[in-house]
Amino acid sequence: MQPAAAKWYDRRDSVFIEFCVEDSKDVQVNFDKSKFSFSCVSGTDDIKHQNAVELFGEIDPKESKHRRTDRSVLCCLRKAEPGKSWPRLTKDKAKCNWLSVDFNNWKDWEDDSDEDLSSFDKFSEMMNSMGGDDLPDLDGADDEHESADSDDEKMPDLE
């Protein structure tokens, strides 16, 4: 048996772990308050995988779930203390060679409040607060006779 490769990321209420196993069957996930285990058989070669993790913090086993797809098994571990950040998944600081951080889904939520605006709204608000009364009106900028820059000459045609 060998451990399955996995990626994890932290959210305000949950921690997510995705086990990267294709064509998995006989999937078993056991949630405990401070640990969880995963096992399955995957691929056409029926490779057996087994992972056991002592968790950094406690979870709510009854609210934790998993979902199997053809390419992976995603586990959602509901935190016992929502709002508490997990700097790592495991209790020990030792690095597991089968585990990595899922940077595609990672989000630094600690500094965000529940009332925060979306990123686009924040960007728009920032741009508006920078002023803009002195910016030129760009409508009709293509018209040469309305150009604000009077020393511009017509460029010669390229050969």
Image (tube, rainbow, N blue to C red):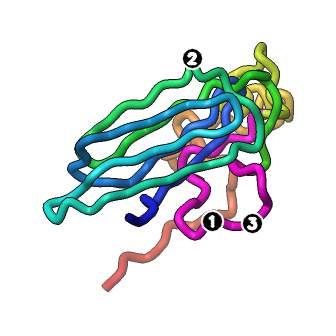
The residue labelled by disc 3 is 94
For the residue marked with disc 2, what is the amino acid?
Answer: Glu
Tell me the SS state at disc 2.
loop
Q: Residue at x 69, y 54 (%)?
A: 149
Q: Earlier in the sequence, mark 2 or mark 3?
A: 2
The front one of 10 and 98 is 98
Q: Are marks 2 and 1 in contact (CB under 8 Å)?
A: no
Q: Is residue 120 visible?
A: no
Q: Is residue 96 visible?
A: yes
Magenta stretch contains residue 62: no
Query: Is 99 displayed left or right of 71 in the figure?
Result: right
Local crowd size for mark 2, using a 10 Å CA cut-off: few (<14), some (14–19), many (≥20)? few
Instruction: State the quadrant of the C terminus.
Output: bottom left
Local crowd size for mark 3, using a 10 Å CA cut-off: few (<14), some (14–19), many (≥20)? few
- The stretch of residues the image draws in magenta is 88-109
The front one of 119 and 60 is 60
Q: Residue at x 53, y 65 (%)?
A: 98
Q: Residue at x 32, y 36 (%)?
A: 68
Single out the residue that lies furthest toward the bottom.
159
Q: Residue 27 in the image: state x and y as whole percent.
A: 32, 40
Q: Earlier in the sequence, mark 2 or mark 1?
A: 2
The residue labelled by disc 1 is 96
Magenta stretch contains residue 101: yes
Q: Main secondary structure of the magenta part?
A: loop
Q: Are marks 3 and 1 in contact (CB under 8 Å)?
A: yes
Query: Is 1 displayed left or right of 10 in the figure?
Result: left
Single out the residue that lies furthest toward the left.
44
Q: Residue 111 in the image: state x and y as whole percent.
A: 85, 33
58 in relation to 55, above or below: above
Q: Residue 74 in the image: state x and y as whole percent.
A: 43, 38
The residue labelled by disc 2 is 63
